[in-house]
Image (cartoon, grey):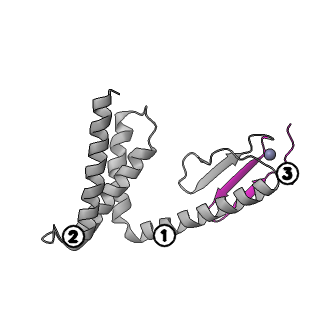
Amino acid sequence: MKEPDMAKLEQLRSALHFLVSLLEEGSLVDRYDKDMREEFASVLRLLVEKVDDLPLEVPENLVHATAVRAIIGASEKSHLAEMADKRDKLERNQREVEASASIQGHLLGEWERVKGSEMENQATCQVCGGFVYVSDSSVYNLLLDDCQRM
Ligand SMILES: [Zn+2]
């Protein structure tokens, strides 16, 4: 992308984040219905997250799908709270695996999301090729007790 395009994108992102905070805080837009205001804020927040997660080269229909998924996600408030809780557990599991892997001398690469799942991640040791899988509720640690180059 050209540099002016990138600058515009940053401006748009910044304005969008500020809009979300205005909607959440509410004093500027107190004539808006409170529930709709908060839900709309969460739609926008979700949209930004989902677009951030998109690979650069995806078909337009998948880009549009992020908007639908943002709306669906925001309409399920209890579901969102549950997801946040699961995400915390997933991250806690990842941190625990990282700590034990590091003690055993493994060098884990980046966590990668398992395709088709939001709450399952995997990582591979860069040295021995050993593998770990975590979700919010389970850990499958297939790393050896000592890291050894294969
Ligand atoms: Zn290893």
In the rendered view, does 136 fall on the left or right side of 105?
left
Q: Residue at x 26, y 70 (%)?
A: 25
Question: Magenta stretch containing residue 27, yes or no?
Answer: no
Q: Is mark 3 within 8 Å of ligand 1?
A: yes
Which disc is residue 82 wearing? 1
Magenta segment boundaries in residue numbering: 129-150
In the rendered view, does 15 fall on the left or right side of 98?
left
Disc 1 residue type?
Answer: Glu
Within 10 angstroms of label 3, few (less than 14), some, or many (20 or more) residues?
A: some
Which disc is residue 144 wearing? 3
In the rendered view, does 28 fall on the left or right side of 100?
left
Q: Is mark 2 within 8 Å of ligand 1?
A: no
Q: Nearer the viewer, residue 18 or 81?
A: 18
Residue 79, picture quadrant: bottom left
Of the image marks 2 and 1, the number of the one nearer the N terminus: 2
3 or 2: mark nearer the eye? 2
Q: CA distance from mark 1 to mark 3?
A: 33 Å
Which disc is residue 26 wearing? 2
